[in-house]
Image (tube, rainbow, N blue to C red):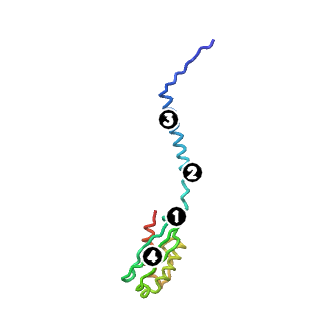
């Protein structure tokens, strides 16, 4: 007749094997999840959403420039209500802010083409916008 064979399994070895198998499965699932979701944040852009303010010094007055960021992109650039002295001594400043703002929003860059008559004002505005974007960086 056949002989009966006994298999002796130590409980300690069985537990170690089960623990390592479970850890292996957890690591594999984690890696798969990580690599599947790796490119999901591509459309968030370079900046945090919000409104950021920078200062622009014009003569003895300080004017604030506001940069609105939406979905990680520059959405709008505007000038807060300038002081009366700024409006009187720099009448083209508001026009320059609108022009520079349109260009920066369109190109999403601080390297923009501006008209020669607004070159100095444009540089002041771009410096204030750069200050805002520094605050908005991720």
Callout in the foreground (2, 4) = 4
Q: CA distance from mark 2 to mark 4?
A: 41 Å
The residue under label 1 is: 45
85 horizontally vs 115: left or right: left
Tell me which residue sits at (42%, 83%) in the image: 83
The residue under label 4 is: 65
User: Looking at the image, do the residues carrying marks 4 and 1 touch, with CB atoms under 8 Å apart?
Assistant: no
User: Looking at the image, do the residues carrying marks 2 and 3 touch, with CB atoms under 8 Å apart?
Assistant: no
* Mark 2, secondary structure of its residue: helix
Residue 19, numbered label = 3
> Of label 2 and label 4, which has the lower sequence position?
2
* Mark 3, secondary structure of its residue: helix
Callout in the foreground (4, 1) = 4
Q: CA distance from mark 1 to mark 3?
A: 42 Å
The residue under label 2 is: 36
Tell me which residue sits at (45%, 76%) in the image: 65
Callout in the foreground (1, 3) = 3
Q: Residues within 10 Å of mark 4 (few under 14, many from 20)?
A: many
User: Looking at the image, do the residues carrying marks 2 and 1 touch, with CB atoms under 8 Å apart?
Assistant: no
* Mark 1, secondary structure of its residue: loop
Q: CA distance from mark 2 to mark 3?
A: 26 Å
> Of label 2 and label 3, which has the lower sequence position?
3
Image position, residue 112 (x, y; %) = 50, 76
> Of label 1 and label 3, which has the lower sequence position?
3
Image position, residue 108 (x, y; %) = 52, 70
Callout in the foreground (2, 3) = 3
Q: CA distance from mark 2 to mark 1?
A: 20 Å
């Amino acid at each position: 007749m056949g002989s009966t064979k006994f298999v002796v399994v130590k409980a300690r070895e069985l537990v170690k094997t089960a623990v390592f198998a479970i850890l292996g499965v957890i690591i594999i699932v984690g890696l798969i999840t990580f690599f599947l979701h790796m490119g999901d944040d591509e459309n968030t852009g370079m900046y945090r959403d919000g409104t950021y303010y920078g200062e622009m010094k014009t003569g003895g007055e300080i004017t604030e420039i506001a940069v609105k960021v939406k979905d990680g992109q520059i959405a709008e650039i505007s000038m807060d209500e300038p002081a009366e002295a700024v409006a009187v001594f720099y009448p083209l400043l508001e026009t320059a802010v609108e022009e520079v703002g349109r260009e920066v929003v369109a190109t999403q860059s601080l390297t923009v083409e501006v008209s020669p008559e607004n070159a100095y004002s444009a540089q002041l505005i771009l410096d204030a916008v750069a200050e805002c974007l520094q605050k908005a960086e991720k």
